[in-house]
Image: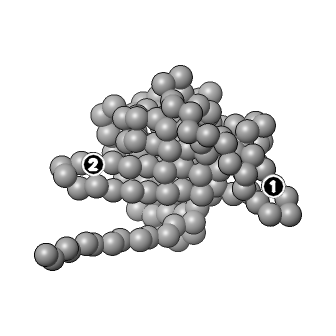
């Protein structure tokens, strides 16, 4: 028996801005690439250097709510940390617009700690794990989500 497995393990560090009230997200990658997702108009803007592209968000892709959806299944509570420990609750959300999600949130305030995404598109299984750290709650200026005028008009 032969098993052929391909592994692609990219690691990307980025700063994420998230505004559920205005349905906007922005990701700033360390390589300078900026991605702005406008869920109101279902558009994504990608800025890399001086180049800018504007694309439609995939059909059915919705912004993930800031905490737990009503259709989530509770998986249990765990403790993370050593000297400073926190309780986290883990939930499973089947068939969201992002794929199947497993999320762990701080038990006391629902801050996202870990998110696992599993998708199967055209018989290609994909697993993504995202760790969130240095989360800060702040009021974002509307300018955080602005894209250059030449990009938004194209």
Vertically, is 20 above or below 48? above
Question: Image check: 18 left or right of 9?
Answer: right
Whole-percent x, y for residue 126 in the image: 33, 56
Where residue 85 is drawn, which disc sits there? 1
Position above or below: 139 against 33: above
Q: Residue at x 33, y 72 (%)?
A: 7
Say which residue appears at 51% left-offset and 67% top-offset: 12
* Circle nearer the N terminus (1, 2): 1
Q: Is residue 143 visible?
A: no
Is there any visible trace of residue 69 in the rendered image? Answer: yes
Q: Nearer the viewer, mark 1 or mark 2?
A: 1
Marks 1 and 2 close (CB-CB < 8 Å): no
Provide the residue designation for mark 2.
120
Q: Quarter of the image holding residue 146? A: top right
* In-image side of 23 versus 127 (left or right): right
Q: Residue furthest bottom?
A: 2
- Depicted 7 relative to depicted 87: above or below: below
Spatial distance from mark 1 to mark 2, Cα to Cα? 35 Å
Please rate how many residues cluster around mark 2, counting C-alpha atoms within 10 Å: few if below 14, some from 14 to 19, many from 20: few
Q: Is 56 left, or right, of 4 in this rendering? A: right
Q: Which residue lies furthest to the right in this view?
A: 83
- What residue appears at the point 77 percent right and 42 percent down from the top-left corner? 138
Q: What element does badge 1 sit on? A: strand
């Amino acid at each position: 028996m032969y098993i052929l497995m391909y592994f692609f393990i990219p690691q990307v560090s980025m700063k994420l801005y998230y505004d559920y009230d205005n349905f906007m997200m922005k990701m700033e990658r360390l390589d300078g690439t900026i991605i702005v997702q406008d869920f109101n108009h279902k558009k994504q803007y990608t800025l890399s250097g001086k180049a800018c592209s504007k694309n439609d968000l995939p059909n059915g892709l919705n912004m993930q709510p800031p905490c737990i959806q009503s259709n989530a299944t509770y998986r249990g509570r765990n403790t993370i940390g050593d000297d400073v420990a926190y309780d986290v609750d883990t939930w499973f959300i089947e068939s969201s617009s992002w794929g199947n999600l497993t999320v762990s949130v701080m038990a006391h305030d629902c801050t996202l700690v870990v998110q696992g995404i599993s998708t199967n598109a055209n018989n290609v299984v994909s697993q993504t794990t995202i760790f969130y750290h240095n989360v800060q709650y702040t009021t974002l200026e509307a300018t955080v989500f602005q894209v250059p005028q030449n990009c938004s008009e194209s």
